[in-house]
Amino acid sequence: MHPVKGLGELERTVMEVLWDRENGATAREVGRALADDRDLAHTTVMTVLDRLAKKGFLVREREGRAWRYRPVATKEAYVAEIMLGALNMTGDRDAALAHFARSVSGDEADLLRRVLDEVEGT
Amino acid sequence: MTGTALLALVAAGSAFGAHRLTRARWTWRTPRTAILLWQALGLAWGLASIGTLLGFGVAPYGQGVIGGVIRFFADPHALSSIRVASVAAGLTFMLMLIVMLLVAIAGVVRARRRHRALLALVAHGDPEIPGTLVLDHPAAAAYCVPGVRSPKVVVSAGTLELLGPPELAAVLDHERAHVRERHDLVLLPFTSLRRVFPQAGIISRTLDAVELLVEMAADDRARRHRPAKELATALLRFAAARPAPTPAGTLGVAGVAAEESSPILVRVRRLLSPAPLPRPLRGAMLAAATLVAVLPLVLYAIPA
């Protein structure tokens, strides 16, 4: 486990805990899950959960006097969303990201492979 | 009236110049200067088009574009309805260009914020490649999220698998060049213009041309400190490994694999046998770009 750094790193760690649990978790449960790794103040955990909920990554529901938090989407879904933008497959060329190379057609890929062999042969 | 006629000439001339420039190959020999020339042409076209409409409208005042428009607001009744319509069209067009640019900026800011938030949750650093985020996905992807405060270079696990260390270093240098030179800001006005005129082929071709020049500028930067061949093979390997695109309606000439039509191959050939334009020619281009950008402003001011 990497040492926990700033608030962003903490958010990641908390999300990991919640992604691992099917039924979500309360702030206390998250705190307990992280206890081996790092001793966090209860209020810190609550702050992080609250921030993540405000950003739309978690939903929460009442459970007694506490809130139970659940991830809105799986980690895989978020990775897929990023890749969709990164591979420029959304069809809308916006200027949000700069890509190393745009996707090519199958024929062009064949051609590029041939040229690659040529270049590497020299 | 001469001023207005000249503005119309500049508008037509810059459109024609853009048309010629989309087909030019020599621009590849000096991408940075060519980008400046494109920006000058775009600016000249916008200013001259607006100026033509305004100039025609306020011509009866005989005070030039700027003086005429000021007078128009003080005393619009002196003009015939067709003149008033022309002024209104000019102002509307100007407003539309500005609003669309702002909309484009807002859209980019929103998309980037979402993208950063997601990256913060699921991407991780790698001690082997400091300053770069790694995304655990088997497909090859490498890109940057530009920004003032914390630009990010991102590569996928698939890319790390695909490229050897020297090739990866070349790709990262290329991406950092995009970040450092703010190429996203270069492209923004052109993408926003395409939203104003989605049907105009000339604007799509312009965007393609400028995008390619931006990539070439980043290629040039990346090869300063390492062999160009590393970047060339990285490009080929990377592009050939990408999944075939593309949803219907996007560009990319399906089925055509001519040597000439592949931007990747054009970049590779250029990396392997560079032929930079001689310095005097670059200087001449720079002078031309400055002239093109300044000319409409001068024509705005002259009271004729």
Image (cartoon, coloured by chain):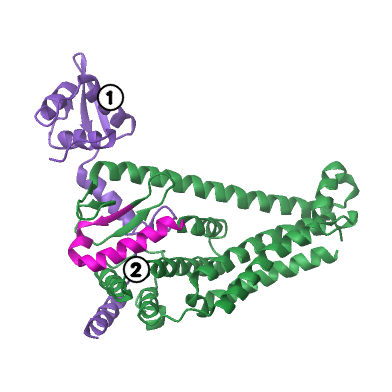
Chain colours: A purple, B green
Which residues make up the magenta segment?
A: B153-182
Residue count near mark 1 (Cα–Cα under 10 Å), binned few <14, some 14–19, many ≥20:
some
Q: Quick check: B72 above or below A60?
A: below
Judge if badges 1 and 2 mark residues of a common chain: no
Q: Quick check: B89 above or below B12?
A: above
The kind of residue tagged 1 is Thr
Instruction: Tell me the CA gap for discs 1 and 2.
Output: 46 Å
- Residue at 56%, 65% in the rendered image: B36
Eye-nearest disc, 1 or 2? 2
Label 2 belongs to which residue? B225
In the displayed structure image, the side of residue A2 where residue A44 appears, left or right = right
- Residue at 71%, 57% in the rendered image: B50
Residue B221 picture location, percent across and down:
40, 66
Q: Which mark is residue A47?
A: 1
Which secondary structure, mark 2? Answer: loop
In the displayed structure image, the side of residue A7 where residue B293 appears, left or right = right
Q: Is residue B99 visible?
A: yes
Rendered-image quadrant of the N terminus of chain B: bottom right
- Residue at 25%, 26% in the rendered image: A60
In the displayed structure image, the side of residue B269 where residue B240 appears, left or right = left
